[in-house]
Amino acid sequence: MSVTFDRVLEKPRLDSPVVKPRPHLGFRPDIEGMRAIAVTLVVLSHAGVTGLAGGYVGVDVFFVISGFLITTLLLNEVSRTGTVSLANFYARRAVRLLPASALVLVATVAGAWFWLPSTRFDSISQDALYATFYGINWRLASEGVDYLNAGAAPSPLQHFWSLAVEEQFYLVWPLLMLIFALTWGRRRAPLVAALLLVTAASLYVSVTQTDSSAPWAYFGAHTRAWELAVGALVAIGATRLAGLPARPAAALTWAGLVAVVTSAIIYDEQTPFPGSAAALPVLGAAAIIAAGCAAPRHGASTLLRTRPFQLVGRYSYSFYLWHWPVLMIGPAALEIEPAVEANLILAAGALVLAVASYHLVENPVRTLAWIRSRSWTGLGLGVGLSAATAAFALVAGQHTPPLPTGEPATDTLRAIAGESAPLARVRKLLDESVRMRKLPPNLLPNPLKAGKNKPVIYKDDCHLTYRETVTPHPCLYGAPAAPETMYLLGDSHAAHWFPAVDAIATERKLRLASRTKSACQAATTLIYHDVLKRPYHECFRWRESVFREIERVRPKFVVLSSNGGDSGGMVDAANVPLDDGPDADQRWTGAWIKTFDRLRATGAKLVLIQDTPWPEDSAPECVVTNPKHVDRCGRHPREAIAEPARRRMIAEAAQRRGVTVIDTQPWFCTAEMCPAIIGNALVWKDNSHLTTAIASAMTPLLAEQFPRA
């Protein structure tokens, strides 16, 4: 949303004879008002206003505005000089954009240091680096397809992704304009052909990738380029568009405004976006700009040029920069719950910050004569601000806020290892742990690094991601040369048991074939994928291939485990929900029965490790936020166990078929609490997955209930 805020285009010469209608190329009040509409939709959506969940389309409106304004500026330069000055272009961008963005980046990193959980600070400081150099959209896309990151709180710098998309566009577009100017002069046809090609290719990729990998489609410059290209096409046709008849032009502007607002109302988080859905706000924005070139008297500009819209439009860049960090950090700083009413007050505060930074930083810097006099001064300012911001983020990232700690806790691994009655020892540890108040200094893993605490199968690429359907390596552990095999099968809630299952396989001299995949339960069913926003076909195909492998290998044991929730819900191939209503538990039980029956036919002994309890939120964040009251991070078993009725039904069905069912709840919970820390072991690495420390410590309990040959 960066260059959408250039305010003054080349003014038409007043001494030129008027032989036909001129395009409205000067300051466009209607575009200023469009900025207000766009930023307001984004802010209200982020604040959680009911009925505007699709307000994220405001970003798409900004993309169209950007494409129009920048292309208009470049075309005017080509008309005047026959070329494009890249140095002047980037100097203008730096002077216009970087003072405000650098201020917000530094303020956000500082605010995160003071008020957000220290578990997040390292990631936020890295986000600041990526945002400084306009690469955060690719970072967010990569993290969006990381299942273990799916439950993480949004970064307070996440909104910089749209600026990154635009800046990546600006790295290419002025250079292409220069090449076209040097090759074809002022001819527009080659430029139009190139833009049409970009639009078609980018839109095609947007639609297809939204279906296959929604995070990459949402944050990618390649899937958003067509939106900027549409704005550029309007800019090229501005002269002809200025001749539109007044009444049709006015009607078109209102239709465009209705399209933009309607999309914000009818879309929500479940809408596959951008894809084809982005066409409604994009074409709506293009219609307002295109028909506005004719400056119709009774068009949407009658609304958009009113003072409230003009004022918000003027501050829209700063407002956009400030609103998201304020919404993300404000509740923690003020110690309030993030609710719609509170968010609206915070958003108003962000607007006040926007006005202040506009008048104190943004506008004064860009109007300094010595900066505007030469391109190298503007470029120097940009380099200096970027370097200073990056240095601040790097230094800050090395100084995570300190945590107060209490007395060392019992070493959980040592306390349980070798016990003849490991469950009794664990129950004693649990009784001690529910009374724990202060964060123990010997906590394992370090809660600040718990997010990286993963079993070795992740490093070995043996835990498959969303898109993968084939295990790339043998992925054999335990005793790899042993003649008999054990399988570990399921999703990430099976993967977090790997340290314990691997230890059992090693002790029993079995080779362990690890077969786990993100968000892919062992139950035989097709589910909807919340991140991919479509049926999870990759899971179904992968699971079938593992079943066939097990049928071929005929192992001695198959260990099954999966998260006990619905994931995205059961669907059929046409994405029709199957598990809504009172029959959901029965459907899931039936899906598990299919898995049990198929695997039993191989002669393998089946072991079902029931799902572990879940914390209310991220356990590491909770304990570092409450280092003197870690007991606040526990959860009552009644709330910590996902779908308890379904859990019982599946266990009963499994036992009837001779499956060994291992109930893990007594290992983690007393009658009143499932604590976040047991001894010196942090139980969860995030909002549901066990740490390797606790999984390893629980090995004796798992081994005790594991069936013999």
Image (cartoon, rainbow, N blue to C red):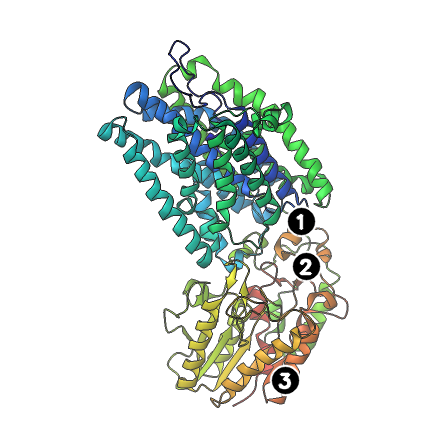
Left or right of 47? Residue 27 is left
Q: Nearer the viewer, residue 587 or 389?
A: 587
* Secondary structure type for disc 3: helix
Q: Nearer the viewer, mark 3 or mark 2?
A: 3
Report the number of discs.
3
Q: Earlier in the sequence, mark 3 or mark 1?
A: 1
* Secondary structure type for disc 2: loop
Q: Nearer the viewer, mark 3 or mark 1?
A: 3
Residue at screen point 61% across, 55% down: 620
Left or right of 287? Residue 204 is left
| Residue 243 in view in this figure | yes
Residue lying farthest right?
672
Q: Which residue is mark 3?
A: 653
Disc 3 crowd rating (10 Å Cα; few below 14, some 14-19, many 20+) is some
Residue 117: give x, y in percent of width and height: 62, 47
Does the residue at mark 3 contact the one at mark 2 (Cβ under 8 Å)?
A: no
Q: Which residue is mark 1?
A: 625
Q: Which residue is mark 2?
A: 616
Residue 22: give x, y in percent of width and height: 42, 21
| Residue 383 in view in this figure | no
Residue lying farthest top?
15
Residue at screen point 28% across, 26% down: 186
Amino acid type, residue under disc 3 in the picture: Ala
Residue at screen point 73% across, 53% down: 629
* Secondary structure type for disc 1: helix
